[in-house]
Amino acid sequence: MVIAITKSGNIENDRTHLPLVYLACYSEPMDKDVRVARALSARLARRMLRLATIIVVFVLAVLFGAVWALAHFLSAWWWLLLLPLSFLFGFCLLAGVIAHLIARRLYTQKLSGEQVRALDAMADTVQRLLEARATPWPVLVLISIKDLLIRRDVTTLKELVRDTASLRSEYSKLRRLF
């Protein structure tokens, strides 16, 4: 169904008037797909932000430690290097807070325990597939050779095929929960 908002501000349900804005109204099945996509995106975004936060905090801690060591052992002038590092810390803090707020706003409804478990399973599968997709084929060949030599089976490729095959069933199960 398409709803049109005309110049006079009236909301029309037909296409006889020249509208300013068309609003698409989706039915329930589309709404479920949108909810699942938003919940899954929020879950993956929180995971990536957690990893990025750990990396940024570690790098900044190492940089602050290096500045302290330089100032302590060489010259007190090295403390001036803390000014740009402080601005970098403030920028990273602001960007992190904004990113976390956006990730929290992606899906704001309370999830049940079953929904959380299904979302985590789907997020794990998607993350494994994305990692495998980003792996260059020579590295994948070397991993397969290692699997053949050590495990006598192509475990990595079998897991990749299993994840790909189970993705549709996991999504339909997740869709039923929403």
Image (cartoon, rainbow, N blue to C red):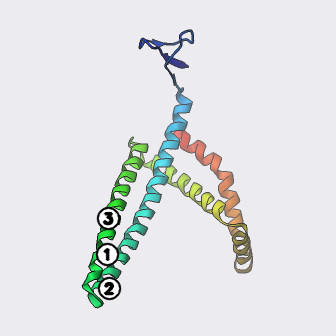
Question: Which label belongs to residue 89?
Answer: none
Q: Measuring 74% from the left and 80% from the top, which residue is drawn there?
A: 149
Q: Measuring 57% from the left and 58% from the top, which residue is drawn there?
A: 127
**Dot 3: element:** helix
* Identity of the residue furthest to the left in this view: 76
Q: Are marks 2 and 1 in contact (CB under 8 Å)?
A: yes
Question: Which label belongs to residue 70?
Answer: 2
Which residue is under mark 1?
81
CA separation in Å, label 2 and label 1:
10 Å
Q: Do the residues labelled 1 and 3 touch (CB within 8 Å)?
A: no
Is residue 178 among the parts visible in the rendering? Answer: no
Precedes in sequence: disc 2 or disc 1: 2
Q: Residue 170: x percent and y percent?
A: 59, 48
Characterize the local packing of mark 3: few (<14), some (14-19) or many (20 or more) Cα atoms within 10 angstroms: few
Question: Which label belongs to residue 87?
Answer: 3
Closer-to-camera residue (94/170): 94
Characterize the local packing of mark 2: few (<14), some (14-19) or many (20 or more) Cα atoms within 10 angstroms: some
* Identity of the residue furthest to the top in this view: 16
